[in-house]
Image (cartoon, rainbow, N blue to C red):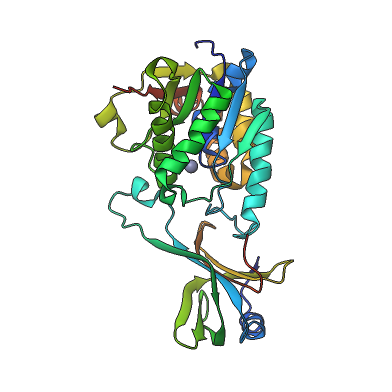
Amino acid sequence: MDIVMKEQVQLALDERANKDVYVHLETTNGAYASHFDETFFSSGAYIRNAKLKYIHSKIAGNGPYRIGLKTDIGWVYAEGITHYEIDEHDRLLMAGHDFNGKLAVSLEISETPFE
Amino acid sequence: MEKERQVLVIFPHPDDEAFGVSGTIAKHIQNGTPVTYACLTLGEMGRNMGDPPFATRESLPHIRKQELQNAAKAMGITDLRMLGYRDKTVEFEPEDKLAQHMGELIKELNPSLIITFYPGYAVHPDHDATGAAVIHAVKNLPEQQRPKVYCVAFSNNCEEEIGAADIVHDVTEVADIKLNTLKAHVSQTQLMIKEMEESLKKQDPAVMARINQERFWTYQFD
Ligand SMILES: [Zn+2]
């Protein structure tokens, strides 16, 4: 993955607008957070292969970045995005890695379902 | 260490065997006991991506699958089963179906010993759910047909609640195999191995004991 280049990501987001896409969205502290620190409140959310069509998208911030997708009747957003890649299946993979290189958030957009 | 007829190791993640069980597995294999390793997921939700990142959410399972195969080779395991569940979703599977799946494996392999996680004392929800399904499956067997079940536990409260481990294997003689198994899971163990090798150099007794002694709790069915 590469460090986010804002204009490149915006272009990639625009290219995938107004068509059916599959979305992976995830936030996580890891399953061990509360094991190592019992005062830590662990939380996270995950959705894989949500099928939707967004009509507008924006990457915001100065890094880590925020990304929002507007649909006809709602929104998708992710915060803390640091890296991106367009993989060999032309999927737009975006992720936020913390200071130890651990994934904390992931937002991915594909025109075909994820495995 | 008691000689077994067949060992069945059941864990949810590709590196679950590495730190606490790989020495025991290697010793069983050296004893001539066949060992089957059934791994439920490919650790798709692992968080270690490296800095700079060497993996993506989508490439990670392919990397970890290869690492699992390398680890199996390092331990001498020839029967590796990848069961096709998804990381962090095991606890949401219908419990009776999961137990049934475990039951089919047990029936096929007829192990004298099963190694899995101690349900409720294994921290990660997938660990607890896997252990629970295995225990459920073994409970379904008539008492005299039940294999022994050795559980791995490491929650902060485990010794308080279930006492000290009753089975302790010294695996010093296969320490190199264990280190190679850990190294095979490089995407997940990179940081840990660096620390470990430092401690090994210093022969830090607490760390040596943690690496060289593998601890299990025999599951009591009644
Ligand atoms: Zn695990």
Q: Quadrant of the C terminus of chain B?
A: top left
Question: Would residue B156 appear left or right of A10 to someone viewing this image?
Answer: left
Q: Is residue B194 above or below residue B6?
A: below
Residue at (36, 22) in percent of width and height: B165
Can residue B81 be seen at all in this image of the molecule?
Answer: yes
Tell me where residue B105 sits by quadrant: top right
Q: Is residue B167 above or below residue B45?
A: above
The one nearer the camera, A56 or A36, is: A56
Question: Would residue A93 appear left or right of B119 to someone viewing this image?
Answer: right
Residue A112, how many percent across, how many down? 66, 70
Spot the residue most to the right. Answer: A88
Q: Is residue B138 above or below residue A75?
A: above
Residue A22, how many percent across, how many down? 59, 72
The one nearer the camera, B120 or B215, is: B120
Question: Would residue B143 appear left or right of A24 to someone viewing this image?
Answer: left
Residue at (63, 83) in percent of width and height: A19
Q: Is residue B187 above or below residue A80?
A: above
Tell me where residue B57 sits by quadrant: bottom right
The one nearer the camera, A44 or B189, is: A44
Q: How many marks?
A: 0
Residue A68, how many percent across, how many down? 50, 82
Residue at (48, 24) in percent of width and height: B114
